[in-house]
């Protein structure tokens, strides 16, 4: 019953407007199915192969989120399966998402991954480049930019993540205020917060948390 207990506890701490994406990486079909049966619709995977393996096996009304680094040559195998790609971080990747979406006559919803923490190992657009990037991506007719995503570095003291989430919130808010100047940009999702730091992320304005370990352990 631990999965159901964890979900109940996590959901009770989330404000109503904050969406939970259950991150199912490394989890068995049986464990994931329990999350769906509990009533969670949104599942997140960070590896293409794992998503492809699980996609046909999970039963129910599921929306798959792709949250990890996405290679261009893999876009075509997931494009018809994903509800939201959280990790668009280059124009070349956006071009491929556009191309593959057009082929299947789909408008693909994406978030732009922003690198606030400037850790070298992390992907994402530099925050100083974000306006130019949004302007370029907004020209792709089969892409809808729904918001922004970031990952904070892991830290024992989660207060250290607060300035990162606050910074992304301010960027999001500014773009939202000016979004009428772009086509295909409808800012309403701010994807930030994982098991370790979601309480801080939510306090700083997150609208979507991506939680794995907190559900399954
Ligand atoms: C694994 C992962 C998560 C969830 O991390 P937990 O610590 O298990 O909550 C969230 N976002 C991304 C991009 C991930 O890869």
Image (cartoon, rainbow, N blue to C red):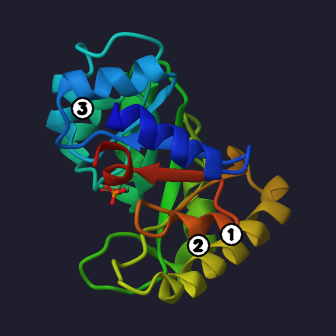
Q: Position of residue 21 (x, y in %)?
A: 47, 42
Where 142 falls versus 153 (above or below)?
above
Where 55 falls versus 92 (above or below)?
above
Q: Which element carries disc 2, helix, strand or loop? A: helix
Q: Which element carries disc 3, helix, strand or loop? A: helix
Image quadrant, ligand 1? bottom left
Q: Could you tell me how far apart the alpha carbons at marks 1 and 2 are, in whole angstroms?
A: 5 Å
Where 104 falls versus 163 (above or below)?
above
Q: Position of residue 209 (x, y in %)?
A: 52, 53
Residue at position x 74%, y 54% from top?
182
Tell us which disc is closer to us: 2 or 3. Answer: 2
Residue at numbered disc 3: 51
Q: Position of residue 167 (x, y in %)?
A: 63, 81
Task: Tell me the crowding category of disc 2: few under 14, some 14 to 19, or many 20 or more residues within 10 angstroms, Cα based.
Answer: many
Label 1 near ligand 1 (CB < 8 Å): no
Residue at numbered disc 2: 200
Residue at position x 30%, y 74% from top?
122
Could you say which is closer to the camera, residue 111 or residue 191? 191
Lower position in the chain sequence, tag 2 or tag 3? 3
Would you say 179 lies left or right of 27 here? right
Would you say 181 lies left or right of 138 here? right
Q: Which element carries disc 1, helix, strand or loop? A: helix
Residue at numbered disc 1: 203
Tell us which disc is closer to us: 3 or 1. Answer: 1
Label 3 near ligand 1 (CB < 8 Å): no
Q: Position of residue 132 (x, y in %)?
A: 59, 71
């Amino acid at each position: 019953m631990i999965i159901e207990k964890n979900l109940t506890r996590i959901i009770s701490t989330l404000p109503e407007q904050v969406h939970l994406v259950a991150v199912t990486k490394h989890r068995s079909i049986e464990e994931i199915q329990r999350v769906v049966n509990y009533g969670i619709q949104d599942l997140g995977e960070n590896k293409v192969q794992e998503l492809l393996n699980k996609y046909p096996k999970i039963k129910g009304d599921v929306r798959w989120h792709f949250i990890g680094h996405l290679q261009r040559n893999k876009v075509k195998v997931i494009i018809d399966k994903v509800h939201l790609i959280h990790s668009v971080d280059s124009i070349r990747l956006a071009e491929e998402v556009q191309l593959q979406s057009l082929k299947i006559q789909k408008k693909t919803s994406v978030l732009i991954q922003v690198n606030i923490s400037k850790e070298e190992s992390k992907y994402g657009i530099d925050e100083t480049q974000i306006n130019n990037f949004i302007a370029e991506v907004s020209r792709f007719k089969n892409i809808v930019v729904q918001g922004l995503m970031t990952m904070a570095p892991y830290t024992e003291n989660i207060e250290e993540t607060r300035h990162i989430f606050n910074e992304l919130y301010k960027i999001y808010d500014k773009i939202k205020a000016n979004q009428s100047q772009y086509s295909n940009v409808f800012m309403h999702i701010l994807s930030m917060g994982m098991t370790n730091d979601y309480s801080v992320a939510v306090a700083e304005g997150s609208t979507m948390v991506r939680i794995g370990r907190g559900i399954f352990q």
